[in-house]
């Protein structure tokens, strides 16, 4: 199965691009959605997180309190790595199962931290949604009700734009109007269909 790893900085427009690919028939797997599933109530993933971080990361209805968990790991590198060691293997296993069972012509695997996690090394192609950092800060501040300082801090926690672009096979420029983005996805969709079926 031909797998395109789709990534981009926070608030770059990955979800919009993923929806455009899905409308064209690609099988989209969103690792953020998978990450939520592996810690659903009753899962061994949630049990492992609670064992590591305590019951304060649970809501009253025994779901994962993501806000509380983010607060615990935000400035604690060791805690963040502990959480990753719990979640990443479970997410990868679930993703690989879905890839193996996919009926689509090709897969778009949406991974916000594709480069940081090393997943770029095993996908067939890396597509990066790119916008200028100033646009990301504005979008993030508006979308998540962050201050500009909080938005800059969230951006700084990810790999740099230059580092992400250095790993890109395809760059999707999301600085223009919606129709330009649709045209870019159309062109890549045709390219990926050809690659998935052995064309050049």
Image: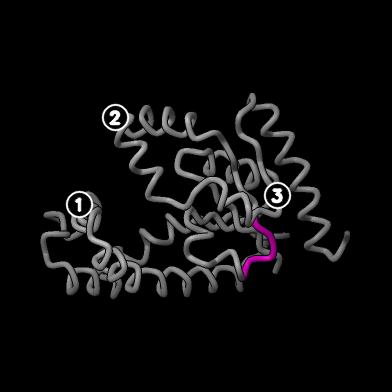
Q: Secondary structure at mark 3?
A: strand
**Badge 3 or badge 2: first in the primary sequence:** 2
Q: Secondary structure at mark 1?
A: helix
Q: Is residue 64 visible?
A: no
Task: Decide if residue 104 is on the left or right side of residue 52.
Answer: right
Do tag 1 and tag 2 residues touch (Cβ < 8 Å)? no
The residue positioned 80% from the left and 51% from the top of the image is 191
33 is higher (above) or lower (below) than 93: above
Image quarter of the N terminus: bottom right
Viewer-closest of 11 and 155: 155
Q: Which segment did they paint magenta?
A: 122-126
Residue located beneath label 2 in the image: 147
In percent of width and height, residue 87 lies at 35, 69
Residue located beneath label 1 in the image: 71
Residue located beneath label 3 in the image: 170
Task: Decide if residue 65 is on the left or right side of residue 157.
Answer: left
- Of all residues, the one furthest to the top in this rendering is 177
The residue positioned 61% from the left and 34% from the top of the image is 174
Main SS of the magenta segment? loop
């Amino acid at each position: 199965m031909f797998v395109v790893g789709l990534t981009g900085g926070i608030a770059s427009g990955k979800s919009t691009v993923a929806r455009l690919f899905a409308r064209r028939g690609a099988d989209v797997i969103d690792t953020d959605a998978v990450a939520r599933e592996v810690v659903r109530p009753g899962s061994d993933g949630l049990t492992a997180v609670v064992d590591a971080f305590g019951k304060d990361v649970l809501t009253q209805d025994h779901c994962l309190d993501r806000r509380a968990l983010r607060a615990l790991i935000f400035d604690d590198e060791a805690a963040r790595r502990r959480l990753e060691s719990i979640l990443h293997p479970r997410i990868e296993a679930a993703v690989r199962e879905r890839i193996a069972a996919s009926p689509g012509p090709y897969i778009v695997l949406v991974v916000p931290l594709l480069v940081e996690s090393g997943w770029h090394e095993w996908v067939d192609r890396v597509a990066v949604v790119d916008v200028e950092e100033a646009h990301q800060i504005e979008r993030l501040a508006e979308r998540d009700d962050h201050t500009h300082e909080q938005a800059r801090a969230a951006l700084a926690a990810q790999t740099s734009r230059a580092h992400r672009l250095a790993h890109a096979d395809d760059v999707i420029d999301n600085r223009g109007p919606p129709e330009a983005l649709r045209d870019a996805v159309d062109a890549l969709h045709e390219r990926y269909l050809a690659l998935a079926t052995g064309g050049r």
